[in-house]
Every structure is written in structure tokens, then in C-alpha cells.
Image (cartoon, rainbow, N blue to C red):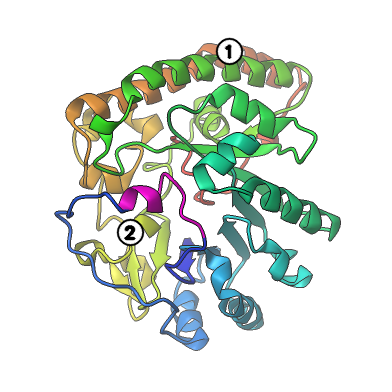
Amino acid sequence: MIYHVITTPECNLCCEYCCGKSFSEPESKLVFETVPTTPQYSQKELADFLKKDLDKPVSLIFYGGEPLLNIDFIKQTIDYQKQQNTVENFFLQTNGMLLDELPKEYVNSFHTILVSIDGNQKTTNTNRGLGTYEKIVSNLKKISSNDFNGELIARMTIEEPTNFFDDISFLLNNKDFSFSSIHWQLDANMWHDYKKRDFSNWIKQYNSDITRLVDYWLSEMRKGRVLRLYPFMGIMNSLLFKKNYFLRCGSGIGNFTILPNGKISACPIMSGVREYYLGDLNSDPKNLPFKLKIKEPCVSCEEYALCGGRCLYSNLNPVWPKKGINEICDSVKYLINELKRIEPEIQELLDKKIISKKDFDFLKYNCCEIIP
């Protein structure tokens, strides 16, 4: 079981695709409540809750807002939960701006760090603010020089007019700081912004870039190197080894979110939505799964077993018109079909032991949603 722990809902950036859009968002049909800026529960209360789930491995993902705005809570949690032996792995999803303020011994205790970076300097700074790219790269170099040896994942958010192939190629190979692990997520069906955008035209270019990237991924495998591109790796894992995971991100199945008020939701984006609360720290973790489920039209789709419904929140609370939602779904199907196209050759590479089955292993529900 994996739990996102919201250390604070506050953030030190105002990214174009997140806070920037929220300013113009019309009143939601959902009822939101204000979430405290810091956790209102004790470490003992958290430990007591986690101990109820010790029949299976438990991991914590520090999340926000920007989680590193509450460094003291992160340090206290790692120290106390290690002492209580309640947590197998710690993760961090961060915008990277404050990584240099977390002491080395805590940084190096993370199994995985996901850092929000959207591509090259221009793309990242346009989306997230002047100087963010430079600060992120500087901090990543610092933690690497301080012997961080966990997995470091570039967490891209993409939308038009981003040139996806160019930006992901840059992150894979550049002179500043290259990544071998990348996850990307489409900014789609999260805001009432479809009519303001050129998504219909851009998604065609994105699909074309997916083909280019799939071909590049395969070319690297022919050399014995499997790049950890999570959308590709996750789907190919299922195609090759017949493993399906219902909703790919695990929200409401094996991945839950602990809010600062002690309430538990299926995923971080549901923070403050009372009707989506599943329980609280007094609940039995075994009673949380499957209270919220993906609905139509996803469950009748021919690719439901591989896609899983993409996003629980947007499935339950769609904000785009049917045309836009269909464009997203068609793109997911396109990605799946492109991976099916290269599956036979990948199987040959496995048979010839040029690559191995373990190259496609990953920890489920590690904050990579798999389906973009």
C-alpha cells in the first residue's frame, strides 16, 4: 500500500497549468473544504494507522502543494516512522526548488524522488517561472554529488504548444542534467479550459511524437538499454507479462492520500472534496479500497484492461466536452497500439537475452500514473 502524505497544500510556484489556471476556474459542482496548511495529527497517530496495514509493504510519498515547504514535518516523519518500523520506502514528489535545503541524510533516505521539470530551459521556465530550470538543475547536481542513489524521475506536465519529442529528448540527453527515468502527464480534462485551447490540433502532433519516441525506445533496446519511460514501460509490462492493474495510478485501490486534517482521499487532486473522502486515520486501511470506482464510458472500452480508465478524478468529474474527452481517449489508444506494434520485436530481444524481464520491473503506484 502506498500513501501520499500532504505536508502542506501551499506552493512556492504558480505554474501555468496548475495554479495559473485555477484563478480562472468557474465555481465547481464539487464541495471543497479548506485543508489545514500543516498536518494536524501526530506522528503516533500516523504510525498507529500504518501499523494496521503491516500485512503488506507500506510506502509514503511526501506530496503537496510543495512538500518541502514543510521540511520539519518530513524530517520528523522519516525519523519517527523509521523508529517504529512502519514504512518500507519513502518517496518525494517535488518541484525541486528547495531540495538543497533538505539535509543530505534525509535526501539519501528516499527510494525515489520525482522532480517536476517539463523539458528544456525555455519550456520549463515558460510553464513554471523564470529561473526554475536553472535552480532545479543546480539542486539535482548537488544531491547527485552527495551520493543520492535512489531513482530520480523527471515528472513532465505537457500541453500545447509543447514540442513533446524535442523536450523529452532533451531530458534524456543534454549537457546540464540527463534523466534515464521519465514520466509525463497530459494536462487534459482537469480544468474548464478546452474551448480556450488548441488541443485538437496539438494532440495530432503529440501522437506523431509518440511514434517517434516508441521507435527511439526500441532502437535503444536493440543496444541492450531499456529507458525507464514509465508510460511505455508500464503498458509493455502488461503486454509482455500479462499483468493488469485496474486503475493504473492505483488511486482508491492501492494508493491513497492522507490530508493534513487526517482525512483520507483516493488521490491528491481530491484534497478537500468531502464527498470523495474514504475515511480518516481512525479507519481500517483494509476498508478503504474500491469505495470509488471508474465508471462508464471507460469500463466498456476495449482497452480498459490496459488503460484502467486513465484518471479516477476526471472520470468522476469530467470538465471537458465529449469531443475533448474522445480526443484524449483516442490518444491513449494510439499509444497502446504503437506499443503493441513493437511488442513482437521486444519479445525477440528478451528471448535473445539482449534485454531482460527485470528491465521492465517498477514499483506500482509510485506516483507515475502510467497512462498520460
Q: Is residue 214 visible?
A: yes
Q: Which mark is residue 119?
A: none
* Residue nearer the viewer, 183 or 339: 183
> What x and y, as percent, mark residue 307?
38, 32
**How many neighbours does mark 1 have within 10 angstroms: few (below 14), some (14-19), or many (20 or more)?**
few
What secondary structure is the magenta-colored segment mainly? loop
Check the image and report above or below for 334 versus 316. Answer: above
Q: Could you say whether the residue bearing mark 1 is in a helix, strand or loop?
A: helix
Sooner in the amino-acid sequence: mark 1 or mark 2: 2
Q: Tell me if 140 is positioned left or right of 262 in this view.
A: right
Quarter holding residue 83: bottom right
Q: Amino acid at mark 2?
A: Pro
Residue bounds of the magenta highlight: 13-22
Residue 68 sits inside the magenta stretch:
no
Q: Quadrant of residue 219?
A: top right
Location of residue 197 in the rendering, given as x and y in whole percent from the top left corner: 31, 29
Q: Which residue is mark 2?
A: 289
Q: Is residue 19 magenta?
A: yes
When the figure is inspected, residue 96 is found, relative to residue 100, above or below; the finding is: above
Q: To which residue does mark 1 refer? A: 344
Name the outermost residue toward the front: 130
Report the amino acid beneath label 1.
Answer: Pro
Q: Is residue 198 left or right of residue 231?
A: left
Label 1 to label 2: alpha-carbon separation = 35 Å
Residue that appears at 57% across and 35% down: 123
Identify the residue at horizontal 17%, vertical 55% (top origin).
27
Quarter-of-image position of residue 40:
bottom left
